[in-house]
Amino acid sequence: MSPSPASTAGDPVSNDARWRARVRKGLLDWFAEHARDLPWRRDPTPYRVWVSEIMCQQTQVATVVPYFLRFLDRYPDAAALADADESELMRMWEGLGYYRRARSMHAAAKQIVENHNGEFPLQYRDALALPGIGRYTAGAILSISSNLPLPILEGNTIRVFSRLIGLRDSVDEKASLDTLWDFSEQLLPRKFSPTDRARGPASLNQAAMELGALVCTPRDPKCLICPVAKACQARAAGLQAEIPAKTQKMKYEARSEYAALVSDNQGRWLVRQIPPGTRFAGMWDFPKAGPPDANDAEHFHQWLTNHLGGRIQLDEVVKTMKHAVTKYRITLNVYRATRTGGPKALAEPWKFRTPDQLKHLPMSTTGRRLLNWVEKNQFS
DNA sequence: AATACGGGGCC
DNA sequence: GGCCCAGTATT
């Protein structure tokens, strides 16, 4: 059930339909004029839109563009992605974060080759069944690439739609999201030619998101240039700054972590490939630990000794790095360290690698930043 | 229903 | 430092 706009009178159902038609037209006309020139819009095949949608999850469009171009160049279709070397794939994804997205895409590409003849499936249920594809992403890929009438709901449209319908309830509540999904569905074009992308779901869904990104922004929404301001219920009530309402606040957590720089006598650094099944699996990093493995420097020293064997000495702190990610506010304390005893051979999975070798291997962002700092300072 | 995911831009 | 970003999977 969609809320009835407060300003309409008479039969609420037909007025709702008329109101939605005005909103729909406003969005489509505006999008035809103001759509950004994004690479996946030039040739919106299902595969290309799939890649763009996965990369855009929890990531701003501007950040995605260079990753998208490199990715499509290296993996032009599902078959190429299915055959991708895992380490190279993670290197391509390095810096985007949420690395499970890349692993899920890899697995999904193999399923597409195996079960769908190498073509991204155009049935909603089939798309939804692929790893890493949920309700939003399935609807987005199929509507944008193939103009299928499927609703979407994500960060932008939660905000745009809740303002349009004047939703006062918190968008943290399931009932609110159900209302917004309903509205998203009702806003889709009712009659359109399957080949008419400009007036169909392909444009409507992108228009709503684009409006959220460029006009109906979280702070300081630009109502004066908004193509649907006259239909907007939040605007009519002067509540555009209060909607969408939230009840839960993010709880940030300060955290200290520790890393060690250990070199051999050939300009190589002690690193390891993170074992499977853990965070950063498959990526390379310096010896690094945080709570609960390393709660302080002494604890970290113990962790190092347990992992490396032999005798390790933590020397001075040579660098501290701040790193903000998800809910954590991390201070990484980087120690110079020396390996003073124990067997000559390193225990698995520890290796010595040169900066040149590490250039081609996937690393966490902090690992890469640390390596760049080490190189710049001619550390050895 | 709540939480993990481990990057980055913007104010 | 807080908030948000073309969310999904897991518990």
Image (cartoon, coloured by chain):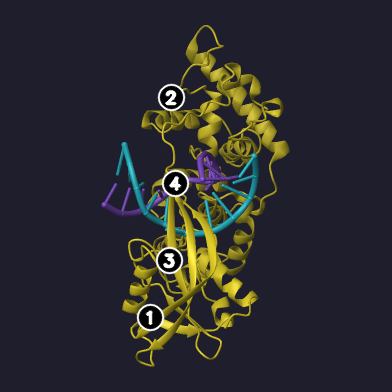
Chain colours: A yellow, B cyan, C purple
Query: Label for residue A169?
Result: 2
Q: Residues within 10 Å of mark 2 (few under 14, many from 20)?
A: some
Nearer to me, A30 or A312: A312
* Mark closer to the observer (2, 4): 4
Task: Report x, y in % for residue A352.
Answer: 47, 85
Instruction: Decide which of tag 1 and tag 3 comes sooner along the chain.
Output: 3
Secondary structure under tag 4 reads loop
Marks 2 & 1 on one chain: yes
Give the letter of the chain under mark 3: A
Secondary structure under tag 1 reads loop
For this orientation, the residue located farthest to the top is A10
- The answer to the question of whether label 2 and label 1 lie on touching residues, with beta carbons closer than 8 A, is no
Instruction: Decide which of tag 2 and tag 1 comes sooner along the chain.
Output: 2
Nearer to me, A243 or A200: A243
For this orientation, the residue located farthest to the bottom is A344
Residue identifier under label 4: A252
Q: CA distance from mark 3 to mark 2?
A: 38 Å
Nearer to me, A366 or A59: A366
Regarding residue A112, the answer to whether it shows in the image is no
Specify the amino acid type for callout 2.
Answer: Asp
